[in-house]
Image: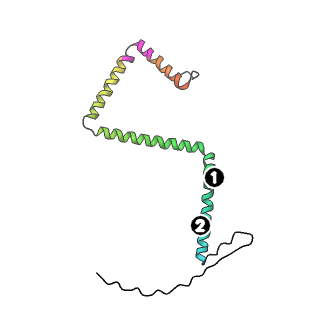
Amino acid sequence: MEAKQPKPPQPETPKVEVTVETADNAPLATVPPTSESESQFQEYVDLVLSYLSKLPDYLGDFFGEYQKPLLTVGLIVAAFVTVKVTLAVLDALNDIPLLSPFFELVGMGYAGWFVYRYLLRASTRKELSEELKGLKNQVLGNNAPKV
C-alpha cells in the first residue's frame, strides 16, 4: 500500500454574498456582460432566438402562398423516386438466372392470348371497344368528349 501524502493547503477564495431587495418587487436588470465579445455574442443569440420564434409564422405563410407549386414539386419528386425504385427492382430481378427469360415467355404468352381473345374476330374487337369506352366513362365521367 502506498502512503497517502497530505494535500498542500489551497488558498481560500474570498466569498461575497449579495442580497438585493426591492420595495415594489420590480424585475431586476440583468448584469451587463463583462466584455465586448460577450455583448456581441448575446446580440447574436437574441437575434437568432427572435428569428426562431417567428419561424412557424414564416413557414405557415410560405406554405399558404405556395401550396400548389409545392404539391406539384412533391408529386414530381415522388414520381421520380418511384420510377427509380421500380427500375432498381427490375434490374435486381433481371440479375436472377432464368427469371428474365421466364418473364419474357410470360409476356409473349399474354400477348398471344390477347390477340387471340380480342383482335382476331370483328365481334371480339367490338367487345374490346365497348369495354374501353366503359372504362373511359368510369375514369373521365359520362360527359367525356367523344374520340
Dot 2 or dot 1: first in sequence order is 2
Q: Residue at x 42, y 40 (%)?
A: 83
Judge the density around disc 2: few (<14), some (14-19), many (≥20) Cα neighbours within 10 Å.
few
Classify the position of the N terminus by image quarter. bottom left
Secondary element at tag 2: helix
> Percent from the top left, x then y, of residue 15?
57, 82
> Percent from the top left, x then y, of residue 86?
39, 39
Secondary element at tag 1: helix
Name the residue tied to disc 2.
Answer: 45
Q: Which mark is residue 141?
A: none
Q: In this picture, is 28 found above or below 111?
A: below
User: What type is the residue that disc 1 sits on?
Assistant: Asp
Residue 82: quarter of image? top left
Colour treatment of the image = rainbow
Residue 27: quarter of image? bottom right
Q: Residue at x 27, y 38 (%)?
A: 96
Write the start and end of the magenta stretch as one range.
117-127
Name the residue tied to disc 1.
Answer: 57
Residue extending farthest to the top is: 123
Between 14 and 99, the one lying in front of the other is 14
Q: Residue at x 51, y 41 (%)?
A: 75
Between 14 and 42, the one lying in front of the other is 14
